[in-house]
Amino acid sequence: MDLEKAPPPDGAAPGGCLAAVIRVPVRIFALLVLVPVRLAWDAAAGGGRFLHRRVLLPLGRGLWLLAYGVLVWPFRALWRYGCVPTGRVLARLGHVLFVVPAGWLGHGVFAPLGRWLTRACAGLGRGVWAGLSWTGSGAARLGRYVGGALARSGRAVWSGVSWAGRGVRGGLARCGRTVWGGLAWAGRSVGAGVSWAGRGLGAVVSRAGRAGWTGVSWAARGVWTGVSRVARAGWAGLSWAGRGLGAALAWAGRGVGAGVSWAGRVAWAGVSWAGRGMGAGLSWVGRAVGAGCAAVGRFVWAGCAAVGRTVWAGASWAGRTVWAGVSWAGRTVWAGVAWAGRTVWAGVAWAGRGLLAAGSFLVRWLVLVPALALWRWLLSPLGRGLVLLCREAADAVALGWRLAGRVSNAAGRLLVRLLRWTFVEPVRWAWSRVLTPMGHFVRDEVWRPARRVARETLAAARHTVRLAVATARRTVRQTRAELRAAVFGGPPAVTPAPSREPEAPVARTLGSSKTALTKD
């Protein structure tokens, strides 16, 4: 006696008696429903294959050939037999009408004309170069004269500027010594003496600056007047020379520019030297003023620092006292607030734990337990039953489809055999046993003799017609010759000329013999 439940055999479907009860009716129903569907599906598939192979493919090929013949072939023929020959003719015509005349024109007209123009331009260039070289030599001599005059004028200007610079330097030196003495005396009296010395220094510097500026402006006006006069003279000469040719004017202008630039550099050197002397004097005065101001600033800074340290000490003591009071008050307030917060938090936490416990109890017995019971005793069995039903339905549909396929194949083979026994075999037997011997008999005994007689009859008639036509042609030709001879006279008789070629020997026969015994 087996006390344990035996496991199901391998390959057995799970589900037990319920699955077996559901499986058989579902498979029977699926088979009854799917057999007509499978038969209709196989018939439609066979009809579709036949339609595709016997109708659609030939129709598509015919439409393709029609489209090719209507749309493609005419354009290809037009291109091959129309456009290409026309293009070749046009290319040949263009070559003959344009390329050949253009080549002849280039070789016969433009090339000799270009060579002649090259020679003419070369001769003209040589003549122009000779004229320019002669004009350049004259302009060079004129430039040397103008350069000498500008050099002499520049030396005179340099001497005037150097004398003016020496005077300005001496005046600035004396002014600087006087200012230094005034500043030393002003330094011994700090207050009003500094202001008085500043006013005196400003007056002296302004007077010295006006004197220096007057001298520099006078020297500059003299330099500008001399340069302008020299430039006007040079410009008059260069304008006279420029009326001859522009190139000579440019060359002379470069010489004049060199002289003027040299004079300008000399004048700028004098002015820069005077400016450097003036700058040295002013910098020395500025250093002295800066030293006095620095001493005054240091004294004022020491006083301000002492006052600031005293004020900072008082402010720091007052701040420390205020900070100590504020910090003590803040610690007292913080302690009270912290105690109140801990008390409130303890109450809120106790209330929250109670509410959480009550909510969890209610959720468990009102939601979770009913939901678990519903899932365990209703939804899960129902779901397993639905899954089993769906699986059995799918298996039944698959099995029914396979069985319907077998039934469809058997029905198709039966129909093919019936068609073969009822139509194909009788037709084949009639063709091979009746129609083929009858056709051979008709071909051998009727068709071939009739065709031979018809061919001989046609050949005889054709020969007779040809002979009649030849006879008629000969008769017409003889009649035309007789008429021509009767109207215009017959042609002279032509005697053939004797031939010098040896005659061909006559063939020997039984009646002709060339021997001595049988010769006649």
Image (cartoon, rainbow, N blue to C red):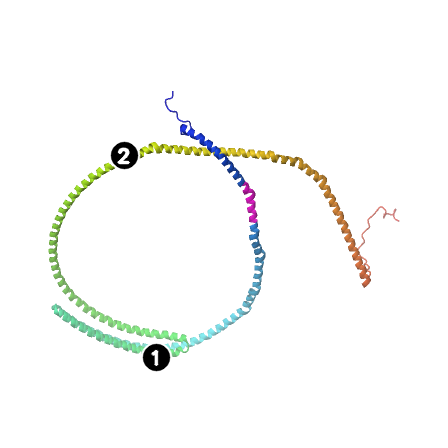
Q: Is residue 491 visible?
A: no
Q: Residue at x 43, y 33 (%)?
A: 393
Residue 95 sits in quarter: bottom right
Q: Residue at x 12, y 69 (%)?
A: 192
Label 1 amino acid?
Ala
Query: Is residue 220 positioned above or below 22 on the image?
Result: below
Q: Nearer the viewer, residue 397 or 112?
A: 397
Q: Nearer the viewer, residue 17 or 302?
A: 17
Q: Residue 204, position in %: x, y? A: 18, 73
Q: Residue 212, position in %: x, y? A: 22, 74
The answer to whether 153 appears left or right of 442 in the picture is left
Query: Is residue 46 positioned above or below 74 on the image?
Result: above
Label 1: state its secondary structure: helix
Q: Residue at x 76, y 51 (%)?
A: 465
Q: Residue 280, position in %: x, y? A: 21, 69
**Which span of residues is magenta-colored?**
49-65
Is 57 in the magenta? yes
Label 2 amino acid?
Trp
Residue 289 sits in quarter: bottom left
Near mark 2 (Cα within 10 A), the count class, few <14, some 14-19 or many ≥20, is: few
**Residue indicated by mark 2:** 365
In primary-sequence order, the first of circles 2 and 1 is: 1
**Residue indicated by mark 1:** 233
- Labels 2 and 1 touching (C-beta < 8 A): no
